[in-house]
Image (cartoon, rainbow, N blue to C red):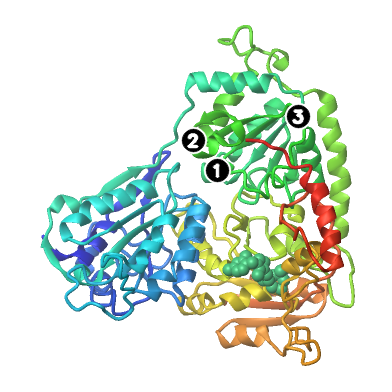
Amino acid sequence: MKLTVAQALVRFLAQQYSERDGVEQRLIPGCFGIFGHGNVAGVAQALLENATDVSASRGIRQGESGIPSGVLPYHLARNEQGMVHASVGYARMRNRLQAMACTASIGPGSTNMVTGAALATINRIPVLLLPSDFFATRVANPVLQELEDPRGYDVSVNDAFRPVSRFFDRVDRPEQLPSALLGAMRVLTDPSATGAVTVSLPQDVQAEAYDWPEELFARRVWHIARPVPEPAALARAVSVLRAAKRPLLVAGGGVIYSEAGAALRAFAEATGIPVADTQAGKGAIAWDHPCAVGGVGSTGSPVANALARDADVVLGVGTRYSDFTTASRSAFQNPDVRFVNLNVASFDAAKLGATMLVADAREGLTALTEALTKSPTHPDKIPDSRESGYRVEPGYAAGFGAHRDEWTKVVDRAYHLDHGPLPAQTEVLGALNELLDPRDVLVQAAGSMPGDLQMLWRAADEKAYHVEYGYSCMGYEIAGALGIKMAAMANAAAGREPDREVFALVGDGSYLMMAQELVTAVSEGIKLNLVIVQNHGFASIGALSESVGSQRFGTAYRYRNADTGLLDGAPLPVDLAANAASLGAEVIKVRTIAELREAIGRSRAATKTTAIHIETDPLAPVPSSESWWDVPVAEVAALDSTQQARKSYETHKASQRPLI
Ligand SMILES: Cc1ncc(C[n+]2csc(CCOP(=O)(O)OP(=O)(O)O)c2C)c(N)n1
Ligand SMILES: [Mg+2]
């Protein structure tokens, strides 16, 4: 079959499916893109043929990105970084069963995707990136936007994707395309290896024709594995857990991606082991489940952090143990603490010198529950009574139960602080938490909100809490929400579950970093809800700056002051509500929490993308997580504020455990 490389690519992608638990779906449901001279004649031409050629869709179900347009629906994004964020939102919402493709032009169009690639890889979320590259033939070099490295003519800006991709290949000859594509699909669908997958496409090669074997375009199903634990590894994990007097389970994102919520609850209920969660794992267990103790680590709940401090065995499930989860390795203070890590990736299972249980989270938890509830002396027999199985002592559960009740009251107070004259951010979170449907998806990524959310948000559904805190990338919120909503619409269209409202909580700094995908949402008729939290700068880094003795330097959005020479002049006349309206959103400006509550209802009921704008006090109080995060303070300084901060830093630093 004679097709260009780009036409073959599109035709191939439209025929890839993934399967898990017997359910199949298109692996690549759609393609985001921005065209330039690097891809307009190649991938764009192929996508046009795909969009207009009705025969191409014969025998293939329409695209699954929520909006049918050819077999590989094309979505025009506004910023290449934004389209990768949207793809990550989509794939995370689909529990990594699907990944969007992203096509970008040569040079800046492509390198704009590097940040998104890092975000995808760090969060272990699949996305297929198709940056364009300079001519493989090099006949007219240097072409517009080519790097020209004097050390070697094969070096391209796209080599910047290598360290942030889990798979990278460059197709310099048409013959290389089939193996590049098979390699790309393999990594996208391998839960232990997935992340950004990059196939770099020189602009001339995209347009080059080749005679392809028909079998390249045959329907292909990629089976997403659920590896079961090796019996010997399971026995080792069980023997550590059986000896535990003060165990704690840490549930990470892997629990959700594996759809292991029910298995997690069954494990917790059978053993009584308390369950703490991470940013990516929040919602794996409902906040009001008797075993749920909230977030663990730097921005966690004091309940989970008290348990972590004394735990003798920590069972990490699907977690990568970021510094926020381990409170920079200060969270676990028991000198004899041991770790058991259930993870599909041996890379993560091996962390903290753990007893490794390499397996799918659902399969691993099910096997652990079964093994722990069996009699240790008659392991082949499941006892009638749990007594001969493993269960935490009643006093342990009663202890964290009481602490949890106290904490619930603290959160209630933070939700209803009645702070003035401007409301507190915790009240905004409270109003949202109380008024959103438990299935509505809340999206956040950077600033002071991820911490407040991890500590205070009450999540009752596995997909309702979507905080990107692997890369914590300002600008993720709106773009990510776009992909999340597309996935929610696709889920509803396929009858997988009812549609969900998506609420992106956007700080003013994050909004100014990247709000462009609002235009994409408007043009595609995809309804988003935004809550723009205006506090005139960086509440987060301002507070951090103060804590490290840097006096909030350069963290407020203000005019330069002629007297001080610093950016501490009058507030800026920035109107983000007007900005959002100019990009096509319906805008509701509110001043009080009462007005906010009313606006949330209106926004939910609206059919068009709606932005609520509220101003908050960046200095309002927030409850303490009773934890720490390691941000080094200057060892020598002229400023007294820095010297004081250094003393406090050294005290905390002493609590850091030299765990492996
Ligand atoms: C792309 C990017 N640049 C810089 C940072 C570092 N950073 C973290 S939070 C933050 C400020 C965020 O401001 P805003 O969105 O207004 O949230 P607030 O802190 O006010 O809640 C900065 C600059 C980041 N996380 N991402
Ligand atoms: Mg701000």
Q: Which mark is residue 609?
A: none
Q: Residue at x 56, y 39 (%)?
A: 260
Q: Are marks 3 and 2 in contact (CB under 8 Å)?
A: no
Percent x, y for residue 404? Answer: 83, 42
The image quarter in which residue 349 lies: top right
Give the residue type that dot 3 points to.
Pro
Q: Which mark is residue 335?
A: 3
N-terminal of the pair, mark 1 or mark 3, is: 1
Quadrant that contains the C terminus: top right
Find disc 1 in the rendering and name its residue: 254
N-terminal of the pair, mark 1 or mark 2, is: 1
Above or below, 410 against 205 in this view is above
Q: Residue at x 39, y 50 (%)?
A: 188
Q: Residues within 10 Å of mark 3 (few under 14, many from 20)?
A: few
Q: Residues within 10 Å of mark 1 (few under 14, many from 20)?
A: many
Element type where label 1 sits in the image: helix
For residue 60, say whether it is visible.
no
Find disc 2 in the rendering and name its residue: 346
Percent x, y for residue 591? Answer: 80, 80
Between 6 and 562, the one lying in front of the other is 562
**Left or right of 79 in this view: 512:** right
For residue 327, say whether it is visible.
yes
Give the residue type that dot 1 points to.
Gly
**Left or right of 174 in this view: 76:** right
Q: Are marks 1 and 3 in contact (CB under 8 Å)?
A: no
Give the residue type that dot 2 points to.
Ser
Element type where label 3 sits in the image: loop
Percent x, y for residue 286? Answer: 69, 45
